[in-house]
Image (cartoon, grey):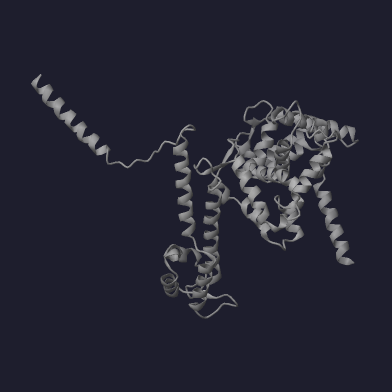
Amino acid sequence: MDLFTKYYSEWKGDRKNTNEFYKTIPRFYYRLPAEDEVLLQKLREESRAVFLQRKSRELLDNEELQNLWFLLDKHQTPPMIGEEAMINYENFLKVGEKAGPKCKQFFTAKVFAKLLHTDSYGRISIMQFFNYVMRKVWLHQTRIGLSLYDVAGQGYLRESDLENYILELIPTLPQLDGLEKSFYSFYVCTAVRKFFFFLDPLRTGKIKIQDILACSFLDDLLELRDEELSKESQETNWFSAPSALRVYGQYLNLDKDHNGMLSKEELSRYGTATMTNVFLDRVFQECLTYDGEMDYKTYLDFVLALENRKEPAALQYIFKLLDIENKGYLNVFSLNYFFRAIQELMKIHGQDPVSFQDVKDEIFDMVKPKDPLKISLQDLINSNQGDTVTTILIDLNGFWTYENREALVANDNENSADLDDT
C-alpha cells in the first residue's frame, strides 16, 4: 500500500504538471456568437470591418503604383530586348529599398526567380513584374471586397451574399449600362448561377471566397468594365448583357403558356428540339421542379450543363441523369436505355437505323474505362470524350453530327477551298 500510494502520488503529480503545460497551448477555437447574442454579433461585425479596413490600407494605391513604375523604369538594366525594358537582381533590390514598406513583400529572391526565364543577362521583364504586382494587389482588393459581403465571416459566400455583391457591382460596369433596372434581378440570378453551378458541386449553398478568386469567372465579370469590349468577347462572356438577354429570351420563348415556368413539353423545344423524351423525363425526375414545372434557376443549371459539356461539373450533372439505377456508373443497360430513344427518333425522321452494339463498342473505345463493363464519372472526365458520349445518348441532332463527322469535315474543307479560289 505504501508503494502504491508513493507511485500514485508521483503519477498524479506528473499529470498535474502536464495539465499546467497544456495551459501554454494558444487558443485556436473561438465559438461564434449565437443568434440571440446581439451584442457579441455586433462586436464581431465591427471588429471584422476594422480588420478589413486595415488590410485595405496596407495595399498599394494608384499613386504608389505609379511611383513604383517610375522607380522600375529609372533602374532598368540595358541592353533592351526590342521594346521590353529589363532589370537585374541588383537594381531590383535597389528599387525595393526605395519603394517603401508596402512593396517589401514583392521584392524577394523568390519573386525574382519566378519571373526569370531565358534572359542571357539574368534579368526579368519590368512589365511582367509590374503586372505581377498589379495582379496581387487586385486579388487582395477583390478578396477584401468579397469579404465585406461574407455575413457569416467564415470565408465563404452564400447565394444571397453573392447576389448582393453582383447587384452593387452592376453600376460600376459600363458594359451593363443599357440594362433596364427591371431586368437586374434576372441578370443577378443568371450571373450567380454560373458561380454556384461550377463552384458548389455538392450543392451546399455556399462557396469559398478563395475558390471565387481562383476561378476565371470574376475576371470575366470584371471584364465588363472595358467600355470598348469587342462584340465577339461579349457573345462568349456569360456575364455580358447580350449573353444574359439571350438566355432569358430563350426561356421566355420556350414558355408558351406565359406562366413563368417550363413544362417538359416546353423544354423539349430547347436548342434544335431534338433531345429525347427519355432524357427529358430524367431531367424532370432529378431536378428541382414545382408541380412538375421548371423555374428559371433550374433552367439556368440545365443550360450551363449543356453549353459546357467538357467541364467536370457539367458532366457530373448529365451523368446523374444518365445513371438511371443510381449505381454510380453507366453499364450496357443504361446506355441501351437512352440509345433506344435515339433509334426511335431516327425512325420517325426516316433515317437509316444504327446498331446499338456498334454505338456501345464505340463509346467504350472512346472512354476506355478502368472496368471494361462500367463507365464511371471519373472515366468520362479522364477520357476527354465526355461531351461526345453524352451528346450521342441524349440528342438526335448531336448523334447525327457525330455519325456524319467525316462527311461534314470534308464538306467544310471543300467550302474553304472554294472560298480560297474566289
Q: Is residue 130 left or right of residue 51?
A: right
> Considering the image in quadrants, where does the N terminus appear?
top left
In the displayed image of the protein, which residue is found farthest to the left? 2
Q: In this view, does 390 lie to the left or right of 253?
A: left
Q: Position of residue 334 (x, y in %)?
A: 71, 29
In the displayed image of the protein, which residue is found farthest to the front? 39
Q: Is residue 173 above or below residue 309?
A: below
Find residue 276 and report its image quarter. top right
Q: Position of residue 398 (x, y in %)?
A: 79, 42
Q: Is residue 383 above or below residue 109?
A: above
Q: Which of 289 and 102 is in front in this view?
A: 102
Disc count in the image? 0
> Considering the image in quadrants, where does the C terminus appear?
bottom right
What residue is drawn where x is 56% and y is 46%? 149
What residue is drawn where x is 49% and y is 74%? 71
Q: Where is residue 265 in the image (x, y as percent from the top left)?
A: 83, 31
- Whether residue 142 is visible, yes or no, is yes
Find residue 33 and report its image quarter. top left
Q: Where is residue 119 in the image (x, y as percent from the top left)?
A: 51, 72
Find residue 233 and report its image quarter. bottom right
Q: Nearer the viewer, residue 369 or 101?
A: 101
Q: In this view, does 55 lie above or below 203?
A: below
